[in-house]
Amino acid sequence: MKAAFLISALSIALLSTPAHAQERASEGLRETISAEIQKLATAANAGDADAFFALTSGSENLVIAGDGRITRGLAEVRANMNDLFVERGSYRWQIGAADVVKAGRHVVIAVAPCQFTAVGDEAAVRLTGAITVVFARNWFWQDYKVVHSHRSTGRIGVAVVE
């Protein structure tokens, strides 16, 4: 009887304890994550798939979303990004200063303004928006790796799940 009461009391105490809220990252972590985001933009602008994917988790759980398209899994994300990379030189990503918060011991979320400029046969098209990147690390990865990214330029569309 005492054991049942103790287990019940402990369960209630644990369930009533609030979850830890997100907290702002230290300046050093913010600088590290901001540098990783700039590396993503540099790799994308150069059309360098190897450099781009070296910054990701390489997991089948990788998700990249943006302006109506959700791409899941490393193979699909790679195919989608390779379609963009072959057009290098006709576009440019610019990422502003990131706001970085910790979302647990090994997860950080970065949100930054972004601008995508595409240059074609006619006038340049410039889309301004924001990018959110979720980074994680574990015992295997010494550095933070991208596990999820979402970009939005404010265009309204219907999501396409691939």
Image (cartoon, rainbow, N blue to C red):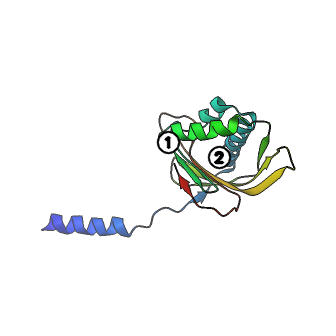
> x, y percentage for residue 118?
79, 46
Disc 2 packing (10 Å; few <14; some 14–19; many ≥20): some
Please give the name of the residue rendered at 53% of the width and 63% of the height, measured from the top-left corner. Answer: 21
User: For the residues carrying marks 2 and 1, which lies nearer the camera in this image?
Assistant: 1
Q: Establish if 68 lies above or below 49.
A: below
Horizontal relation, residue 134 to residue 93: left or right = left
Give the position of the N terminus as an image quadrant: bottom left
> x, y percentage for residue 55?
61, 36
N-term mark: 2 or 1: 2
Q: Establish if 34 lies above or below 111.
A: above
> x, y percentage for residue 147?
54, 45
| Gap between marks 2 and 1 measured at Cα | 27 Å
Residue lying at the far left in this picture: please name it.
Answer: 1
**65 or 138, which lies in front?**
65
Residue under numbered circle 1: 73
Residue under numbered circle 2: 29
Q: Quadrant of residue 77?
A: top right
Q: Which element carries disc 1, helix, strand or loop?
A: loop
Q: Do the residues labelled 2 and 1 touch (CB within 8 Å)?
A: no
**61 or 119, which lies in front?**
119
> x, y percentage for residue 94?
78, 47
**1 or 155, which lies in front?**
155
Amino acid type shown at disc 1: Gly
Amino acid type shown at disc 2: Leu
Is residue 144 visible to the viewer in this orientation of the structure?
no
Is residue 134 visible to the viewer in this orientation of the structure?
yes
